Image (cartoon, grey):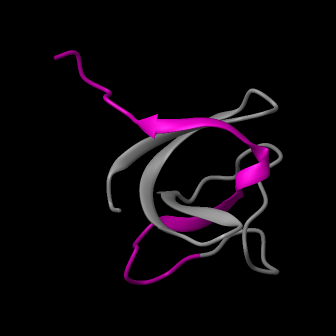
Amino acid sequence: MYQFIQVELKDGAVYQGILHSYNKEKMYLIMPNMHHKGMRTESVHESRLFSFFGPFGLFGFLFFGIRAFGPFFPFFI
C-alpha cells in the first residue's frame, strides 16, 4: 500500500501512480488528475477531486483489464 507502482493494461496503456487500495475486483491508484485518453473515473463526473489528495484523482482499474503491475523505479539506481 502507498507504494509508487506502474500498471500496464491489456490495451498497452501504461500508468504510474500510488497504490491507494484494492478489493476483489479493482485496484485504486492516486494519479495526477489529468484527462487520460480512454480512462474512466469512478464517479459520474469526468474528473474526481478530493481535497485531501490535492490536484490528484483516485482511479480504479479492473483486475481483468490489467496485463502487469509492479514497483516503478523512475530513477536509475
Q: Is residue 7 left or right of residue 25?
A: left
Please identify the quarter of the rendering in which residue 2 is found: bottom left
Q: Decide: is 21 above or below 65.
A: below
Q: Residue furthest top?
A: 76
Residue 71 percent coordinates (x, y): 38, 37
Identity of the residue drawn at 78% across and 50% down:
64
Give whichever of 71, 43 is nearer the camera. Answer: 71
Residue 55 part of the magenta segment? yes
Identity of the residue drawn at 32% across and 52% down:
3
Magenta segment, which residues? 49-77
Please identify the quarter of the rendering in which residue 28 is found: bottom right
Q: Name the quadrant of the C terminus.
A: top left
Q: Decide: is 57 above or below 34.
A: below
Q: Decide: is 72 above or below 76.
A: below
Q: Is residue 47 left or right of residue 21?
A: right
Q: Name the quadrant of the N terminus.
A: bottom left
Give whichever of 50, 64 is nearer the camera. Answer: 64
Q: Decide: is 25 above or below 19.
A: below
Residue 24 percent coordinates (x, y): 66, 70
Identity of the residue drawn at 48% across and 64% down:
56
Identity of the residue drawn at 38% across and 34% down:
72
Q: Is residue 44 left or right of residue 25?
A: right
Residue 73 part of the magenta segment? yes
Number of numbered callouts drawn? 0
Q: Residue furthest front?
A: 24
Residue 29 percent coordinates (x, y): 52, 59
Q: Is residue 50 left or right of residue 52?
A: right
